[in-house]
C-alpha cells in the first residue's frame, strides 16, 4: 500500500496563504493477493486465487469549498472554487489568475480465479477459469470551473473591433468580459468484465514424450457506464 499526499501552490492570489495548506494532490495505491490450495484427494488439487489492485489520483485546488465565488459575488458560479481570470491583449498588463486543476482518477481491478488439477493415469488434467473485472471512476482533467473570464482590450479600442488601441486591464476595470465559460462535469463509473476459461491435458505418451493439449476461451467485454451517462453513435446500425 502506498499513500503520497503532497502540497504545492495552485492559486496565485490573495487567497493563497497559510490557511490553504491542504494537499494539492494525493496518490494512493493498493496491491493484494490471497490464495488457497485445497487437497481434495491424493490426485485432485484445487487452487483459488484473488487479486486486487487499486490506483487513485486526486487533484484539487486549494480554494475548493472555501466560498470564494460567494465572497466575490459570483452568484452564477458553477462550482465552489476560485474563478480563472485572464488579462491579455495590448498594453503593459498581461497576467492570469488560475484556480488550479481539479480531477479524480481511480482505477480498481479484481482478478478471481480457480484451477483444478487432476491426475488420471498418464494424464495430468487442469481446468478452470478467471474473471478480469475493471473499474474506472474518473473525471475529465479540470472537471470543475466556477468561471473563466477573458479580458482582451476589445471594448476599449478606438473603434469597435478595429484592432487599434485597447487595454485588457482597462476592460477588466470596466467589467467588460470578452468571453466567459464555466463547467462542472461529474465523475463517471466505467466498467468492464472479461471472463476466461481453459482446459489443459498433459498426456505422457512415452517416458520421453509428453503431449500438451488444451483449449482456452476468452470473452472481452466492452466498457459501459454504470448510470448510462456515456454512449456513442454508430450510423451503420439500423434502428
Image (cartoon, grey):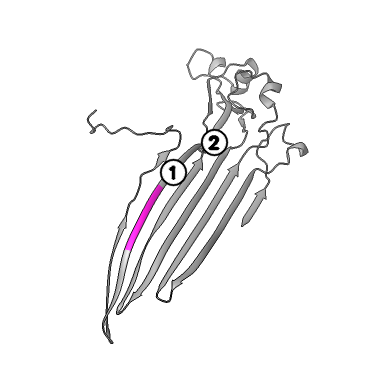
Q: Which residues are magenta?
A: 193-198
Disc on res. 191: 1
How crowded is the residue under tag 1: few (<14 C-alpha within 10 Å), some, or many (20+)?
some
Image-quadrant location for residue 41: bottom left
Q: Which residue is mark 2?
A: 142
Give the residue drawn at x 46%, y 56%.
111
Depth order, front residue of 55/24? 55
Give the residue drawn at x 63%, y 15%.
174
Check residue 196 for magenta coloring.
yes
Check the image and report above or below for 195 versus 124. above
Left or right of 202 on screen, residue 223 = right
For the stretch drawn in magenta, the main secondary structure is strand
Counting from the top left corner in percent of width and height, residue 207 is at 28, 87
Check the image and report above or below for 87 versus 3. above
Counting from the top left corner in percent of width and height, residue 212 is at 28, 74
Depth order, front residue of 91/195? 195
Check the image and report above or below for 201 versus 99. below
Check residue 182 for magenta coloring.
no
Give the residue drawn at x 52%, y 55%.
52
Query: Secondary structure beneath disc 2?
Result: loop
Give the residue drawn at x 54%, y 51%.
55
How crowded is the residue under tag 2: few (<14 C-alpha within 10 Å), some, or many (20+)?
some
Left or right of 68 on screen, residue 158 = left
Q: Which residue of the protein is positioned furthest toward the right in this rendering?
A: 18
Depth order, front residue of 52/70? 52
Depth order, front residue of 130/87? 130
Image-quadrant location for residue 11: top right
Image-quadrant location for residue 42: bottom left
Q: Are marks 1 and 2 in contact (CB under 8 Å)?
A: no
Q: Which residue of the protein is positioned furthest toward the top in this rendering?
A: 159
Amino acid at each position: 500500500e502506498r499513500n503520497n499526499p503532497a502540497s504545492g501552490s495552485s492559486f496565485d492570489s490573495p487567497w493563497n496563504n497559510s490557511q490553504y495548506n491542504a494537499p494539492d494532490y494525493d496518490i494512493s495505491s493498493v496491491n493484494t493477493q490471497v490464495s488457497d490450495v485445497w487437497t481434495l484427494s491424493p490426485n485432485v488439487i484445487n487452487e483459488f486465487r484473488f487479486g486486487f489492485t487499486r490506483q487513485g489520483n486526486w487533484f484539487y485546488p486549494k480554494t475548493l469549498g472555501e466560498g470564494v465565488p460567494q465572497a466575490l459575488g459570483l452568484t452564477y458560479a458553477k462550482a465552489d472554487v476560485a474563478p480563472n481570470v485572464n488579462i491579455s491583449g495590448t498594453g503593459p498588463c498581461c497576467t492570469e489568475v488560475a484556480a488550479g486543476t481539479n480531477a479524480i482518477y481511480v482505477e480498481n481491478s479484481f482478478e478471481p480465479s480457480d484451477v483444478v488439477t487432476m491426475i488420471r493415469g498418464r494424464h495430468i488434467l487442469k481446468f478452470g477459469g478467471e474473471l478480469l473485472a475493471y473499474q474506472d471512476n474518473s473525471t475529465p482533467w479540470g472537471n470543475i470551473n466556477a468561471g473563466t473570464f477573458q479580458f482582451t482590450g476589445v471594448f476599449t479600442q478606438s473603434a469597435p473591433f478595429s484592432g487599434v488601441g485597447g487595454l485588457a486591464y482597462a476592460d477588466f476595470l470596466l467589467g467588460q468580459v470578452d468571453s466567459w465559460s464555466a463547467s462542472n462535469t461529474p465523475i463517471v463509473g466505467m466498467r468492464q468484465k472479461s471472463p476466461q476459461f481453459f482446459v489443459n491435458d498433459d498426456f505422457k505418451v512415452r517416458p520421453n514424450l509428453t503431449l500438451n493439449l488444451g483449449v482456452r476461451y476468452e470473452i472481452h467485454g466492452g466498457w459501459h457506464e454504470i448510470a448510462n451517462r456515456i454512449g456513442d453513435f454508430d450510423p451503420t446500425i439500423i434502428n
